[in-house]
Image: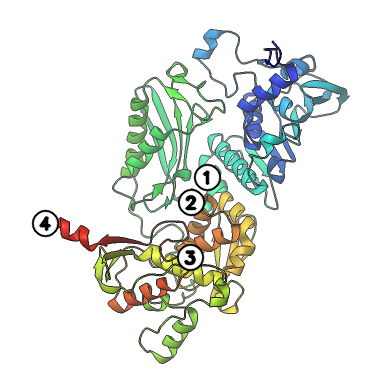
Amino acid sequence: MSGERRIRQLPPEVAARIAAGEVIERPVSVVRELLDNAIDAGAKRIRVTIAEGGLRSIEVNDDGRGIPPDQIEVAFERHATSKIAGAGDLQRVETLGFRGEALGAVAAAAEVDVVTRAEGEPVGVAALLVDREVVRRSARAAPVGTTIAVRELFAKVPARRNFLGSASSEGRQITTLVSHYALAYPGIAFRLEAGRRPFQTSGDGNLRHAVAAVYGAEQGDAMLDVAHEENGIAVAGLTGPPSLHRGNRTGIALFVNGRWVQSAALRFAVSDAYQSELPGGRYPVASIALHVQAEAVDVNVHPAKAEVRFRDQRGVARVLRHAILKALEGAGPVGWALGDAPASEEAPAEAPRPSLRERLQPPEAAETQRILAGDLGRAAPASEGAWSGTQRETLPLLRVVGQVATTYIVAEGPDGMYLIDQHAAHERVVFDRLKARQDAEDAVQPLLQPVLVELDRLAAAVFEEHGSHLGRLGLALEPFGDAACLVRAAPAGFGDGDIAGGLRAMLEKLGDERRVADPFDRAAASVACHSSVRAGMALSLEEMRQLIEDLGATTSPRTCPHGRPTLVHVRQEALARQFGR
């Protein structure tokens, strides 16, 4: 019938591109598939080079067994693999790759150059593939191993490119991936070239050295050994002492039979072992490898191979929790938090920590107080000109009554009771001041002694991306070696007196921040968070009044920069109903 759409078989090249999208979602998917193949090929050295976050080019070089000359074409066909022969093999998958889709999917999504030399071959082979077809092939001198270069990913599928993140965002995902592979395979020397600071591991087989390469030498030294076997499940790796924790779960790296997996049940088992050891909202750091029988785990449940299914998930989680508890029980007491140095005669004297009263004021008011030793001064509101053209929210006149749990300020207003979250409120105040003074000289307070801060690779990548923004906000940072920086100036109250710890925590939060879109505002929100009054700090009535007055002068007094509410209003009628009035 005219006007009807007839059912037809898709052309092979179209079907291949659709299928490729199930396996290759973004640049990090390409890197993962190529790393899996390199490791399965027995590589001991792997180099990953990316340009523009992998959007322009990705190159993975390994010293594995290589591809035999007569198998290059078939290697890029769909469902072609040397790792699975029959359906029964799917019950015992002991390799990282097994579907035979990786190379075919990559070649369908981009132009691919291959240079490979198999063991026992006198010369290598170079091939160029376009739409999975070899369009050029020649002999080439090459060492044993394989180099695969992927260029202009998704250039022929612009709709998919539009859904990718920025080059820096895609590059961070690749950094995270390679870092986790380095932790899973400490016996392989990894090198990632993705900017000014290449990341590399020694490949000496020592997991503690791999952790030090990823997170820093201090963390590598502080980690606790994990070694436990129960019910046929072997657990080995490193986990952090209770003094070492993060604001999210990204520090928990879990590997099942050599495969990095995202498992909510296993992550919960690790966190649960620290249940009474960590502050609320904080999570441990761990790099744990589990080995279970191949028949007891199904790896073919996720297109990107990021999840697995266990025959007995509760049993595996229970064994993992026991392993972490055993490591924690054997740990001695910790005298100071990671990043703090024990007192020594050689250590330079730290500048005195600003009082809470000083921290609740702008820099010029704090300076006046230090000179005159007077009462808490009235904070000058942000310049009206800085916020021209916006409609500012206002707060009602509030009378401070007291403080609950040293976290919430209780105030009385015209229509009931107000509970103010002191941290969220001060975060909004500091954020607005940073925005108003972003280019002012008084935003920077030089330190008497510069502070050297060692950074893990992810934090170093965040620092490289946001360094200019942080400088405008009063954090004067400069690179120092491959994965460290010097702090020469910081905003008042930053890091609660611990500059190194505050900077690491801020970069961690900044790298994980998704709620604030603008890069400068994102940096300002992170600095404000780590320069603000914390929950658990006792405030005087004077300080509480000043904080509420400053909050009322901000642009959005009802939310913090991350969108959390700064206050809760309980109406008079609601209070009356609770008392039966």
Q: Is residue 479 visible?
A: no
The mark that comes first in sequence, 4 or 1, is: 1
Which residue lies under the disc numbered 4? 580
The mark that comes first in sequence, 2 or 1, is: 1
| Residue 456, horizontal then vertical, whole percent | 55, 51
Mark 3 and mark 4 in contact (Cβ < 8 Å)?
A: no
The residues tagged by marks 4 and 2 sit, at their Cα atoms, a distance apart of 57 Å
Callout 4 secondary element:
loop
| Residue 463, horizontal then vertical, whole percent | 60, 57
Q: What amino acid does circle 1 point to?
A: Val
Outermost residue toward the bottom? 372
| Nearest-to-viewer mark from 3 and 1 | 3
Which residue lies under the disc numbered 2? 219
From the viewer's perspective, tell me whether residue 475 is left or right of residue 47: left
| Nearest-to-viewer mark from 4 and 2 | 4
Q: Quadrant of residue 27?
A: top right
Q: Quadrant of the C terminus?
A: bottom left
Closer-to-camera residue (185/507): 507
**Disc 4 packing (10 Å; few <14; some 14–19; many ≥20):** few
